[in-house]
Amino acid sequence: MHCIKLLGQRLAARDFDRQITEVHVRITVLNRFTALGIPLTHLVA
């Protein structure tokens, strides 16, 4: 939850359905940033 709040403390949307969409977008962005930060490792034989 702390990482989601780093993307903004408040929701811009006022409608509940749009708030849900906004949270989903934030989670998608956070997951993409996390995926970019994970190193790719290869087994060296």
Image (cartoon, helix red, strand yellow):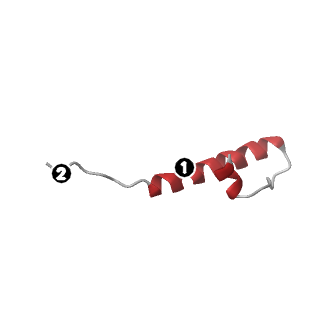
Residue drawn at the location 46% of the way across and 57% of the way down:
37
Residue drawn at the location 68% of the way across and 50% of the way down:
2
Look at label 1 and name its amino acid.
Asn
Q: Disc 1 marks which residue? A: 31
Which marked residue is nearer to the observer: mark 1 or mark 2? Answer: 2
Whole-percent x, y for residue 21 in the image: 71, 45
Whole-percent x, y for residue 3 in the image: 64, 52
Q: Is disc 2 placed on a helix, strand or loop?
A: loop
Residue drawn at the location 74% of the way across and 42% of the way down:
20
Whole-percent x, y for residue 29 in the image: 59, 54
Q: Disc 2 marks which residue? A: 44
Depth order, front residue of 16/34? 34
Q: Distance from label 1 to label 2 (Cα)?
A: 28 Å
Depth order, front residue of 20/36? 36
Q: Is disc 1 placed on a helix, strand or loop?
A: helix
Whole-percent x, y for residue 44 in the image: 18, 51
Depth order, front residue of 15/9? 9
Disc sitting over residue 18 in the figure: none
Residue drawn at the location 42% of the way across and 53% of the way down:
38
Q: Callout 2: few (<14), some (14-19), or many (20+) C-alpha neighbours within 10 Å?
A: few
Does label 1 or label 2 sit earlier along the sequence?
1
Look at label 2 and name its amino acid.
Val
